[in-house]
Image (spheres, rainbow, N blue to C red):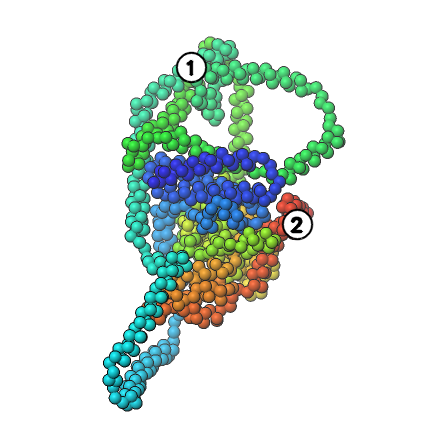
C-alpha cells in the first residue's frame, strides 16, 4: 500500500518539477497571475509533503527511507521558499486560497501543514535522557515543578474550624429539608384522598386514561428518534458512536507500533551490513582495485609524454588527486581532454591579441537606452533561484534509476538490498585506496622525471604554496581572536546545571500544536477583494508557527538552506495562547527552552560582565544542545519607551543592546530561535522592536467558527457530554470577544466532579456557562483595532498599506529600502 503511495507521489512530484521551470523562467508583470501560480505550486507541494511524510513514517525498507528523507527535506525547503516569495509579493504573512482550493477540489483542512513525526522519533532517547537530567537537577536543588504549578496556601486554625462548621451545618440543613419534604408529601396525599372520597369504580375509563398518556409518550419518543435520524443523515449531527474509538482504529494503532519495531530492527541490520560488506569487499576486491588504478595512472603518464613531450603535473591532495582526472572517464576521454585544452589555450592567446585594439565609447543616448531597459527588466517579477530544486531532481532521478522498475518479489520482508550497499561501498573503498595510490604514484612520477627528463620541481611553486599557507594561518588567528570563549575551562554539563538552578533553562510543558484549536477563515478573499484587511484566523497562526518555528528547528538540512528566520514575535491580547505556542514549538521539536524574560533575569548575573557571562553561557549551551528556543516573555519591557518607576529596580532594558548583536552571530548552522511574546506592543520603541524581531505574527481573538470548535472540544476534553439541550452555536455567538483562556476557565469552573456525575439526569445547558462568563472582561473591538493599527506601523504593515491604497508593491518595497538607507546614514552620523 505504502509502496504504491510512494510511486504515485513521486510521479506527481516529477510532473510538478517539469512544470515549475517552464512557468517561472519567463518574467511576469501581472501580480494576480504570479500569486495564483505561486499559490498553486505551494498547495501542490504541501499535498506531496503530506503523502511523503506518511510514507516515510510507515515504510520499512531502510534504503528507500534514506531516499524519501532526502526528497522530503527538499519539499519542505521548497514550501518555505514559495512562502517567502508569496510574502514578498503580497507584503503580508497571511494568504487566502479559496479560489484555488475550489479549482483543485480540496477542503481547507487539507491545507493544514503537518509536523513530521521523525522530528521526535529519531531523537526520542536523547530527549528522555535530557528530561531525566533536568528532573534530577531540579530535585537536587529543591525546586519542585509540581509545587510551582499548584501552590498550596496555608490557612489559620480559626478559619479552618469555621469552614468545617459551615460544611457541617449545611449537611444538617439538607437532611432537615429532606425530612420536612417527606412529612409534607404524606400530608398532601392524605388531603387528596379526603377530597376525592370514594375510589374510581369504572375500570374502562381508567384504562383509557392510561392508554392516552402512554400513546402520547410513545409518539413523542418516536418523532424525536426520527428527527435525530434525519439530522444524522443530513450530516447536521454526529452518529451515536462517533466519539467512541472503533476496533479498526485500535487495530491500525497496533499495526503502526509493529511497523515502528520492524523499522528499528531493519535499520540496525542495515548499519551492521554497511560495516561487514565493506570489510568483505576490502578483502576480496581491494588488491584488484589498487592494481587497476595504478595501471590507469601509468598509462596516463605515458600518453601525456607521447602527446606533449613532458610528463604531466600530478594534482594535489587539496584539489582531489587523480580523482579529478579520472572521474567517470576512460583513458581515451582523458587524452581527448588534454588535446582540447591545448587547442583552447592557443585560441585564448589569439583572442587576447585582438582585444588590445581600442573599443568605441558609448554615447549618452545609448547609456540612457540601456538604463531604461534595465528599469523595465527590474519592474518585471522573476522567481529567485531555489536551493532545494536540485536535491529534489536528484532524488527523482535516483528513484527512476533504482526503484521505479525494480523487481522486489524476492524481498517480501522489505529488508536491505545487499547489491546496492556493495555499489556504494565500492565507491568509498576506491576513494580510500586512491589516496594511498596517489602517494605512491607521485613518488613514481618524481623518479620518472629525474630518470628520463631530468626535470626538477620549481622552488617558486613551493614558495608560493608556503606563502598561501601563511595567509590561511593568519586568517585562522583572526577568527580565534574574534570568538572569545569566556567559559573555556568549564564543561557543558556544569553550565547546563547552573542555568537550570538559576531558572534560565526551564522545563517546557508538554503541549502539542494540534491542541491549539482553530478554524479556517472563510471570508479572507472576499474581504480583500473589497480592500479590507481581515484579521488572521487561529489556523493561519498555527500554520505560520509550523513554517517559521517547527520545520526549521526540526530539520538541520532545511534550516541551513531555507530562508533563515532567527526571531519571531507573537503579539496579541492576554489569553489567546501565545505562551502555549512557545511550549508547543519545544514539544514538537524536542528543543530546550531558555527563559530570558526581564522578570526572570532580574537580580541575576548583575553588572555588564555578569550579563555578558549569562548570555555567553545561554547561547553556548543552546548551540551545543540544539535545537533551542530562547523565550522573552513580555518583551515590550525590554524595549520600553519610558520605564515605569515601579519597574526601574528590575532593569527591564538590560538585553536591548545585546539582542541585535546576538542575532548577527547566529549562523544557518545554529538551530536557535528567539521568540518574544507581548500583550502591549504599543509600549515599546517600534524601530528597535522591529529590528530585533524578523517575523511579527499577530495572534487575534477567536472568531465565531473558532469559538464554536473551541466550546465543543474543550467541553468534551473536560468530561462534558454534548446533547441537544446544549446550544453550542448560541454559546459561540454570545461569547464574542472572549479568548481561549476565558473559555477554558469557564468550562473548568462549571464542569466539577459533581456536575459531571449529574449529567445523566440533568444535561448541560448554555445558561450554566453564560452565568460563569459574565464576571470576566472580554477583549473589546477597540483593543483589537489598537493591535491592528500598531501592526500597520511595522515595516511589512506599512508596505501592505501602501499597496492597498493604490501604490504598487514595487513602490512600497522601494520606499522601505529608502527609509532603511536613511536610518543607516543617521546612525553613521551619530
Frontmost of labels 1 and 2 is: 2
Badge 1 vs badge 2, beta-carbon distance below 8 Å: no
Horizontally, is 622 left or right of 756 in the view?
right
Labelled disc at residue 197: none
Q: Is residue 746 above or below residue 504?
A: below
Residue 284 % position (x, y)? 30, 23
- Asked if one can make out residue 142 in the rendered structure from this viewpoint, the answer is no
Could you tell me how many numbered marks the image carries? Answer: 2
Residue that lies at the very extreme toward the right in this rendered image: 364
Q: Residues within 10 Å of mark 2 (few under 14, many from 20)?
A: few
User: Which structural element holds mark 2?
Assistant: loop
Badge 2 is on which residue? 806
In percent of the image, x 47 and y 46: which residue is there? 105
- Quadrant housing residue 163: bottom left
Badge 1 is on which residue? 298
In percent of the image, x 30 and y 50: which residue is there? 248
Q: Is residue 416 above or below residue 203?
A: above
- Asked if one can make out residue 368 in the rendered structure from this viewpoint, the answer is yes
Q: Identify the mark nearer the N-term, 1 or 2.
A: 1
User: Which structural element holds mark 1?
Assistant: helix
Q: Nearer the viewer, residue 180 or 260?
A: 180
Task: Using the numbered discs, state the Cα–Cα distance from disc 1 to disc 2 in whole angstroms.
Answer: 73 Å
Horizontally, is 675 left or right of 355 in the view?
left
Quadrant where the N terminus is found in the figure: top left
Residue 316 % position (x, y)? 47, 23
Residue 395 % position (x, y)? 43, 34
Q: Residues within 10 Å of mark 1 (few under 14, many from 20)?
A: some
Amino acid at each position: 500500500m505504502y509502496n504504491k503511495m510512494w510511486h504515485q507521489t513521486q510521479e506527481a512530484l516529477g510532473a510538478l518539477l517539469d512544470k515549475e521551470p517552464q512557468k517561472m523562467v519567463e518574467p511576469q508583470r501581472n501580480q494576480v497571475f504570479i500569486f495564483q501560480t505561486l499559490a498553486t505550486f505551494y498547495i501542490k507541494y504541501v499535498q506531496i509533503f503530506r503523502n511523503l511524510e506518511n510514507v516515510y513514517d510507515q515504510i520499512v525498507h531502510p534504503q528507500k527511507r534514506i531516499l524519501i528523507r532526502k526528497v522530503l527535506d527538499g519539499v519542505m525547503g521548497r514550501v518555505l521558499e514559495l512562502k517567502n516569495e508569496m510574502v514578498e509579493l503580497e507584503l503580508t504573512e497571511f494568504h487566502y486560497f479559496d479560489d484555488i482550493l475550489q479549482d483543485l477540489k480540496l477542503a481547507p483542512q487539507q491545507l493544514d501543514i503537518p509536523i513530521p513525526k521523525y522530528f521526535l522519533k529519531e531523537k526520542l532517547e536523547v530527549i528522555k535522557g535530557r528530561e531525566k537530567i533536568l528532573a534530577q537537577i531540579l530535585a537536587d536543588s529543591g525546586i519542585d515543578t509540581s509545587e510551582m504549578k499548584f501552590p498550596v496556601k496555608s490557612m489559620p486554625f480559626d478559619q479552618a474550624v469555621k469552614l468545617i462548621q459551615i460544611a457541617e451545618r449545611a449537611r444538617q440543613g439538607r437532611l432537615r429539608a429532606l425530612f420536612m419534604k417527606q412529612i409534607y408529601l404524606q400530608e398532601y396525599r392524605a388531603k387528596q384522598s379526603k377530597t376525592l372520597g370514594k375510589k374510581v369504580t369504572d375500570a374502562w375509563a381508567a384504562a383509557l386514561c392510561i392508554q392516552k398518556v402512554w400513546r402520547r409518550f410513545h409518539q413523542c419518543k418516536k418523532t424525536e428518534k426520527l428527527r435525530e435520524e434525519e439530522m444524522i443523515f443530513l450530516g447536521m449531527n454526529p452518529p451515536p458512536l462517533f466519539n467512541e474509538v472503533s476496533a479498526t482504529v485500535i487495530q491500525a494503532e497496533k499495526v503502526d507500533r509493529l511497523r515502528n519495531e520492524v523499522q528499528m530492527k531493519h535499520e540496525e541490520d542495515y548499519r551492521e551490513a554497511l560495516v561487514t560488506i565493506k570489510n568483505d569487499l576490502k578483502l576480496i576486491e581491494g588488491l584488484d582495485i589498487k592494481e587497476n588504478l595504478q595501471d590507469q595512472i601509468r598509462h596516463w603518464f605515458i600518453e601525456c609524454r607521447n602527446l606533449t613531450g613532458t610528463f604531466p603535473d600530478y594534482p594535489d591532495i587539496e584539489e582531489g588527486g587523480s580523482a579529478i582526472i579520472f572521474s567517470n572517464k576512460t583513458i581515451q576521454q582523458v587524452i581527448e581532454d588534454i588535446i582540447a585544452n591545448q587547442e583552447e589555450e592557443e585560441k585564448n592567446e589569439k583572442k587576447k591579441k585582438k582585444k588590445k585594439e581600442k573599443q568605441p565609447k558609448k554615447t549618452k543616448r545609448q547609456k540612457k537606452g540601456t538604463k531604461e531597459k534595465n528599469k523595465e527588466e527590474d519592474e518585471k517579477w522573476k522567481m529567485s533561484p531555489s536551493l532545494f530544486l536540485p536535491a529534489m531532481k536528484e532524488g527523482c532521478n535516483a528513484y527512476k534509476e533504482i526503484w521505479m522498475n525494480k523487481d522486489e518479489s524476492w524481498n517480501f520482508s522489505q529488508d536491505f538490498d545487499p547489491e546496492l550497499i556493495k555499489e556504494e561501498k565500492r565507491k568509498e573503498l576506491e576513494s580510500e585506496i586512491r589516496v594511498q595510490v596517489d602517494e605512491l604514484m607521485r613518488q613514481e612520477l618524481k623518479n620518472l622525471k629525474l630518470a628520463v627528463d631530468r626535470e626538477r620541481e620549481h622552488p617558486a611553486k613551493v614558495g608560493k604554496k608556503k606563502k598561501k599557507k601563511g595567509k590561511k594561518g593568519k586568517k585562522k588567528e583572526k577568527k580565534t581572536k574574534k570568538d572569545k570563549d569566556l567559559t573555556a575551562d568549564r564543561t557543558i554539563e556544569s553550565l547546563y546545571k547552573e542555568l537550570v538552578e538559576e531558572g534560565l533553562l526551564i522545563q517546557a510543558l508538554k503541549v502539542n500544536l494540534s491542541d491549539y484549536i482553530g478554524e479556517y477563515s472563510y471570508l479572507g478573499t472576499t474581504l480583500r477583494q473589497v480592500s479590507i484587511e481581515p484579521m488572521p484566523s487561529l489556523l493561519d497562526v498555527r500554520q505560520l508557527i509550523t513554517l517559521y518555528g517547527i520545520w526549521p528547528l526540526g530539520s538541520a538540512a532545511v534550516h541551513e538552506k531555507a530562508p533563515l528566520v532567527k526571531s519571531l514575535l507573537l503579539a496579541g491580547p492576554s489569553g489567546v495562547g501565545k505562551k502555549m505556542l512557545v511550549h508547543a514549538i519545544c514539544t514538537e521539536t524536542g528543543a530546550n527552552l531558555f527563559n530570558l524574560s526581564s522578570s526572570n533575569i532580574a537580580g541575576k548575573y548583575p553588572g555588564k560582565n555578569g550579563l555578558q557571562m549569562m548570555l555567553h553561557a545561554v547561547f553556548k549551551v543552546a548551540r551545543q544542545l540544539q535545537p533551542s528556543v530562547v523565550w522573552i516573555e513580555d518583551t515590550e519591557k525590554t524595549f520600553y519607551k519610558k520605564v515605569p518607576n515601579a519597574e526601574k529596580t528590575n532593569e527591564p532594558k538590560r538585553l536591548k543592546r545585546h539582542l541585535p548583536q546576538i542575532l548577527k552571530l547566529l549562523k544557518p548552522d545554529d538551530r536557535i530561535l528567539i521568540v518574544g511574546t507581548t500583550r502591549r506592543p504599543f509600549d515599546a520603541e517600534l524601530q528597535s522592536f522591529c529590528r530585533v524581531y524578523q517575523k511579527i505574527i499577530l495572534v487575534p481573538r477567536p472568531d465565531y467558527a473558532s469559538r464554536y470548535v473551541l466550546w465543543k472540544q474543550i467541553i468534551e476534553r473536560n468530561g462534558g457530554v454534548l446533547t441537544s439541550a446544549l446550544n453550542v452555536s448560541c454559546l459561540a455567538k454570545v461569547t464574542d470577544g472572549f479568548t481561549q483562556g476565558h473559555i477554558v476557565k469557564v468550562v473548568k469552573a462549571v464542569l466539577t466532579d459533581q456536575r459531571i456525575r449529574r449529567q445523566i439526569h440533568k444535561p448541560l445547558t448554555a445558561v450554566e456557562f453564560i452565568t460563569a462568563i459574565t464576571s470576566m472582561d472580554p477583549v473589546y473591538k477597540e483593543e483589537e483595532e489598537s493591535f491592528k493599527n500598531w501592526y500597520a506601523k511595522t515595516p511589512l504593515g506599512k508596505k501592505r498599506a501602501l499597496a492597498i491604497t493604490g501604490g504598487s508593491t514595487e513602490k512600497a518595497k522601494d520606499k522601505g529600502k529608502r527609509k532603511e538607507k536613511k536610518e543607516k546614514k543617521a546612525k553613521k552620523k551619530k
